Structure formats: C-alpha cells, structure tokens
C-alpha cells in the first residue's frame, strides 16, 4: 500500500512542473498563436474569428476556416520587422558579450574568495533585485542624461568639458542590459567555478602551465557550462527586452519588443503583434534547445 | 635480467658519507598563521631513492611535499634539489611532478590528452608527444582506454592515468600524495609492487606521502616518521620496526607492548629493567643507560611466546596471566593476555599448521615470555 502511495506521490511531483508549463506557457502560447492567424477588426476583441462555445464543434470548425497566414506574409513584406529582429539580436548579442566580460571576473573572484565571505558576496550580487527593476532603470536616466551625475562628475574632475551624449543611444541600452542582467550571468558561472576541484589548477601548474595558461586550458573549459547558461539567461530576455530600450534608448533604436508594443497598443493590431511574438519565440527556441544539449552533455560527463 | 631485490639490497647511499643528497631540506619551517606545520626540519633524500614520509594527518608530511612541488613556500629555511635552491621557483618551472591524492585528472579531456597535457605545454613536437603518450599508456597498461574520459574509468584505472600523466614529462623526482589511498585493499597491495617495479625500471627518485604504515614499509627504501612538523626517525623499514628510536615510533608503527620501569643494572650490552608491573626484564641494548633512570621496554607481539608451562628463565622475562581475548586472523592468531596487575599484553602466533590439537582457549592460565633480544629499551 505504502509503495503504491509513494509511487503516486512521485508521479504527482512530476506533474506539478508539467501542469505549470501547460497552463502558464503552452495554453497562453496557443492563444497568441491562434490570434496571429486571425484578422484585425474594429471590435471588442479586435480580431476575428471569435469562437463562441454556443456554436458547438461545427461553429468552431467554421471559424477555423477563416484562419490565414496573412499576418506572417505581412511580416516578410515590411522590412521594418526584419530590421527590428536583426537589430534586437545584435543588441542582445553585444550586451551578452559585455555582460560576460564583466560577469566572469566577478564570478571568478567570488569563487576564489575565502569560503566564509562567499555567502556575503552572493548576497551582494542578488541585492539589487530587492529594488524594483523599473526604478533601477529610471535611476540610469538620472545618471546618464547630459546634465546627469556621470557627466557632472566627469566635468568636475576635468576629464571632459562637453557632456557625453549617452542617454537615448545604443550605449545606454547596453549599459542598462548589462547592469540589469549581470546577476543572471554571475550566478551560473559562479556555481560552475565554485564546485570545481582547485587541485586541477595545481595539477596544470605542476605540469608546466603558468597560472594564466592553466586558466585557459583547465578552468575556463570546465566553467563553459556555466558560461553558456549565463549567456542564454541574458541573451534570451534581452532579445525581447522592452523596458530598457524604451526608457534608455533613442527614438531610432529598433528593437522587436518595442515594435511589438507599438503594434499592440498604438495600432491595436493584435493579430500582427501576435505573429511578431510567435516568430520571436521561434527564433529563441533554437538557443534554448542548444542550451539543453550542452546541459545534458555536461550532466552525462558527471560534472 | 638482474633481480630487483639484489639491486635493492645493495642500495644504501645514505650510509655512504661521500654520496651527495639529491634533495635537501635545510632547517625548513612552514607556518600557517600561528600554526606550525613544519618545524625546523632537515632531511636528505638521495637519487633513485624510494622515500616515504609517514605520519598521522596534520603531521606536516603533505605540507613538506607541497613545498617540494612549489605550491607552498617555506617560511624559513631552504630546499635544495639537484644542487639548485628552489626558493622563488614557481611550480611550473620545477623539475618535479606530482601525483595528487584526488588524482586531479582533467575531466574534460581524454586519457590521452591528460597524459599529453604537460608535453603539449612544453611545446614538444606532435609526433614525439604521440610516441611518449603511447609509451606511457603501455607502461600503465591502459592502451585500450586512450580515448576514454576520466569518468568512464574505474578508480584503479584513474590512478594509473594520474601516474602516467605525472611520469610523462620524465621528472627528476616524482611526488606521490597518498597514491593508493583511494584504492581497495587488494588493488592497493598489487599497485604497491607495481610502483616499486616502475621506480626501479625508470630509475627515478620517488617521494611518497602516506599515513598507511604498511604501504610505507612495503615500498620505501627509507621512511621518515613525522609528528607535529618534525621528523622523529629516518631509517629503513626494518630499522624503524625493529629498532624504533622512541616510544612514539614504536607505538606508531605496528603493534607493540610497552613495559615502563626503571633501569636496575647495566651489564655488557644488556640492561635490567624493573617494571611497574613487577616483571623483571633483561634486554640487550646498545643505549648507554645509567642505573635509576626511567626506561621503557618495547616488545612486538610476534616476539612474545604464549605457553601453558612456565619457561625455564622465569620469572625473568616472563609473566603469568590469563587469556582475555582471541582474535583469529587466518594467517595468525592474536592473543590478549591479562597479567596479574591488570596490564593486557598482545601476543601473536603464526598458524603454521591447519589444525592444532587442544588449542589455547579463553580464560586459560598461561605464561607469556620473551627472549633477551626480543625488544628494545627506550629512554623515556
């Protein structure tokens, strides 16, 4: 009896995450996908067909005949969307690279720090999350604007005499993304470095490596799973980022999150914005699948 | 082919005052904060020697090895290797290689690349690397496992890869930190002999750190017994076992019965000791001991006889007691015999025949006795 109960319990435990994914990912995605196949109308809701359960199965089938891929065709016809996707990918890639450049040394330093102060360092990395994301991005406006803190400081110490124009450029977006997503880069790399056996670097040095070559031949390859995880955790949300380009970026900054927002709210074109979102998801699925593979490979190697 | 045993028997450079030590620790001290890990230690190790540092954990033996490898710097004193002062030389420029206790194999590399790691680092030409790696794989009998990753190997195979990797660069000295610690007993015993053969074959100097006295006794030409950062005794395994220079060494290596007492008389190379338990002992000793000083007599269990009848020399070197415990180990039997004053003596006897008529049993009254050359007299 007990055994059956525990078998049922273990099934239930597995069901929870799947149910979560079903209700909060798959179902919403199908709603979005379904809207992307619809036509825009001036109505409430602003698209057609709208299914009515009263019509029964035949009513639903009738409605499904109205589905079309026109919106996807439209996306290929207007170069704006293509440019927005490409520009988003480039901005996300550059930001991810910059985040890695800054995040790796931080994670490395944390992993090398004495065991007793590591929890404090970890806490400091997570600390910014205790303030609202929006407030922190707004704070960057105050820092970066021409008469802002940064320019005042640089002019005071005499490095520059004209204020730097950073706000409303892509640089402001990079700064915003790097700052906001840094913990997502630091934490997986730290976790990979922290569990690494430090005698491996000693062994490398014993076999003739200087500390620097030991890092590149042993430490870095072994932290690669953490690097990949961190890069994806930054890259994926950065591609669809809306708040940071909207607040810090300029009017000419083209990012797909902003485009989507405009379609949805300004143009009230739900079907096209749904198509934009669906394509974005497909673009991002590829790196996620890659990430899964790397992760599975790392697991099978017992690290 | 010359037998390895015959080479070994004649090998004793430490006894020759003209031979130059290969490795010299000179008054080396290492402190970690307030803790003194190695305390003003001096030690010489000779070319082609298989040298063991033996001691309990925390005695400083690993620190000594790590200083030789270059991972720790001595607080004071100097280490000379082949005429070169090692001070300030980083690990990657020392002509020594280390086999780590955890093996420290690179998990992202195959067996082959692990072994080639140091050679590649030195910029050896590719064909030479391939040749050397093949040679090493053959040496440790892992030819079939060249393409495997460390996690696909058994513990014993990993140990061999670690050994091959540390030997690949042909170091002047191989340092081994608890090399067999992670292996099971049977494999450990096999590997001990393999290591000895390998060392002879390659003509290298091996310095091994171990807490396992059996391992040290089997493999080493000489053993340094360490305690609290100091070397207590450096000698061959036989000397360490049969002629320990202190109570600590006698007690640390193997089993021993120690009788405390005072010196009652000395006569041409023999000492009379009156023990606390009332057993009068006469023991051969080269130590100069004056009458009335405190001394201890250490006697190994296998040198104690257990008989039903009193021996002829009783009561000298003999005592009466009863059998308290019997441990049957297969090859031998260990008796715990409780003397009249409550002291428990360990005696072991070889089971030379398969069945003994009327064997000694629990609670039997017996005599324990020993010869005049069975033990050593130690100054307290």
Image (cartoon, rainbow, N blue to C red):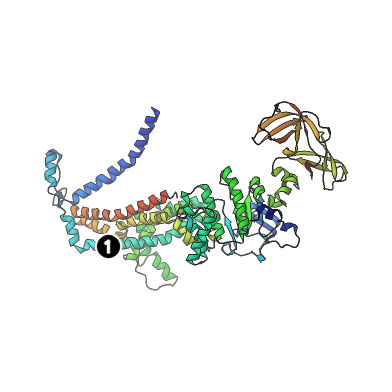
Residue at left offset 54%, top offset 52%:
B160
Label 1 neighbour load within 10 Å: few <14, some 14-19, many 20+: some
Q: Residue furthest bottom?
A: A161
Q: Foreground residue, B160 or B40?
A: B160
Q: Is residue A20 above or below residue A137?
A: above
Pinpoint the chain carrying mark 1.
Answer: A
Q: Is residue A278 above or below residue B342?
A: below
* Residue A248 is at least partly visible in this image: no
**The N terminus of chain A - image quarter:** top left
- Image spot of residue A234 (x, y percent): 36, 56
Name the side, left or right, on which A36 lies relative to B300.
Answer: left
Name the side, left or right, on which A104 lies relative to B140.
Answer: left
Name the side, left or right, on which B228 lies relative to A155.
Answer: right
Residue B214 occupies quadrant? top right
Q: Is residue A34 above or below residue B272?
A: below
Secondary structure category for the residue under label 1: helix
- Image spot of residue B282 (x, y percent): 83, 39
Residue that mark 1 sits on: A86
Q: Foreground residue, B232 or B127?
A: B127
Name the side, left or right, on which B20 lies relative to B160.
Answer: right
- Image spot of residue A255 (x, y percent): 27, 60
- Image spot of residue A272 (x, y percent): 19, 55
Q: Foreground residue, A60 or B20?
A: B20
């Amino acid at each position: 009896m007990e055994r059956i109960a525990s078998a049922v319990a273990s099934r239930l435990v597995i069901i929870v995450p799947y149910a979560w994914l079903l209700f909060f990912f798959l179902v919403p995605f199908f709603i979005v996908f379904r809207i992307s196949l619809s036509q825009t109308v001036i109505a409430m809701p602003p698209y057609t067909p709208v299914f009515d359960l009263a019509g029964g199965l035949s009513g639903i089938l009738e409605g499904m005949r109205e589905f079309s891929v026109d919106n996807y065709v439209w996306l290929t016809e207007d170069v704006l969307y293509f440019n927005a996707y490409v520009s988003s990918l480039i901005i996300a890639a550059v930001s991810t690279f910059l985040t890695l450049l800054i995040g790796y040394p931080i994670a490395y330093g944390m992993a090398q720090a004495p065991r007793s102060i590591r929890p404090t360092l970890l806490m400091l990395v997570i600390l910014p999350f205790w303030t609202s994301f929006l407030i922190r991005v707004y704070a960057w406006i105050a820092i970066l604007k021409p008469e802002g803190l940064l320019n005042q400081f640089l002019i005071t110490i005499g490095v520059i005499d004209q204020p730097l124009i950073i706000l409303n450029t892509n640089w402001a977006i990079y700064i915003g993304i790097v700052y906001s997503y840094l913990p997502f880069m630091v934490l997986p790399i730290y976790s990979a470095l922290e569990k690494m056996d430090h005698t491996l670097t000693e062994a490398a040095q014993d076999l003739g490596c200087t500390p620097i070559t030991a890092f590149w031949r042993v430490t870095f390859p072994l932290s690669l799973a953490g690097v990949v995880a961190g890069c994806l955790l930054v890259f994926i949300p950065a591609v669809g980022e809306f708040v940071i380009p909207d607040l810090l970026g300029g009017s000419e900054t083209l990012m797909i999150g902003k485009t989507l927002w405009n379609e949805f709210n300004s143009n009230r074109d739900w079907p096209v914005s749904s198509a934009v979102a669906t394509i974005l998801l497909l673009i991002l699925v590829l790196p996620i699948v890659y990430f899964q593979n790397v992760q599975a490979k790392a697991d099978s190697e017992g690290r | 082919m010359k037998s390895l045993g015959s080479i070994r028997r004649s090998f004793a450079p430490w006894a020759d005052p003209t031979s130059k030590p290969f490795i010299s620790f000179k008054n080396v001290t290492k402190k970690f904060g307030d803790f003194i890990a190695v305390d003003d230690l001096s030690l010489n190790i000779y070319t082609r020697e298989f040298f063991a540092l033996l001691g309990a954990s925390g005695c400083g033996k690993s620190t000594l090895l790590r200083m030789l490898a270059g991972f720790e710097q001595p607080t004071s004193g100097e280490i000379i290797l082949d005429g070169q002062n090692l001070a300030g030389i980083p690990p990657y420029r020392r002509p020594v290689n280390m086999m780590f206790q955890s093996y420290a194999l690179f998990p992202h590399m195959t067996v082959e690349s692990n072994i080639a790691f140091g050679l590649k680092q030195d910029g050896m030409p590719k064909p030479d690397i391939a040749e050397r790696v093949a040679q090493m794989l053959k040496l440790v009998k892992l030819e079939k496992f060249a393409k495997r990753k460390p996690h696909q190997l058994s513990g014993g195979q990993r140990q061999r890869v670690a050994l091959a990797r540390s030997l690949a660069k042909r170091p002047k000295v191989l340092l081994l930190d608890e090399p067999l610690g992670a292996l099971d007993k049977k494999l450990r015993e096999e590997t001990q002999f393999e290591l000895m053969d390998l060392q002879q074959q390659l003509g290298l100097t091996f310095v091994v750190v171990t807490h396992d006295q059996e391992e040290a006794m089997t493999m080493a030409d000489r053993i340094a017994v360490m305690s609290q950062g100091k070397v207590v005794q450096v000698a061959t395994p036989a000397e360490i076992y049969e002629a320990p220079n202190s109570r600590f060494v006698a007690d640390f290596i193997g089993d021993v019965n120690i009788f405390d007492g005072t010196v009652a008389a000395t006569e041409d190379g023999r000492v009379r000791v009156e023990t606390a338990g009332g057993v009068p002992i006469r023991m051969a000793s080269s130590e100069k001991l004056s009458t009335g000083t405190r001394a201890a007599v250490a006697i190994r269990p296998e040198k104690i006889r257990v008989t039903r009848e009193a021996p002829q020399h009783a009561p000298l070197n003999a005592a009466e007691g009863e059998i308290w415990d019997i441990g049957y180990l297969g090859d031998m039997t260990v008796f715990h015999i409780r003397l009249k004053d409550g002291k428990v003596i360990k005696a072991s006897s070889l089971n030379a025949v398969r069945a003994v008529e009327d064997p000694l049993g629990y609670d039997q009254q017996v005599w324990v006795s020993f010869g005049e050359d069975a033990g050593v007299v130690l100054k307290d």
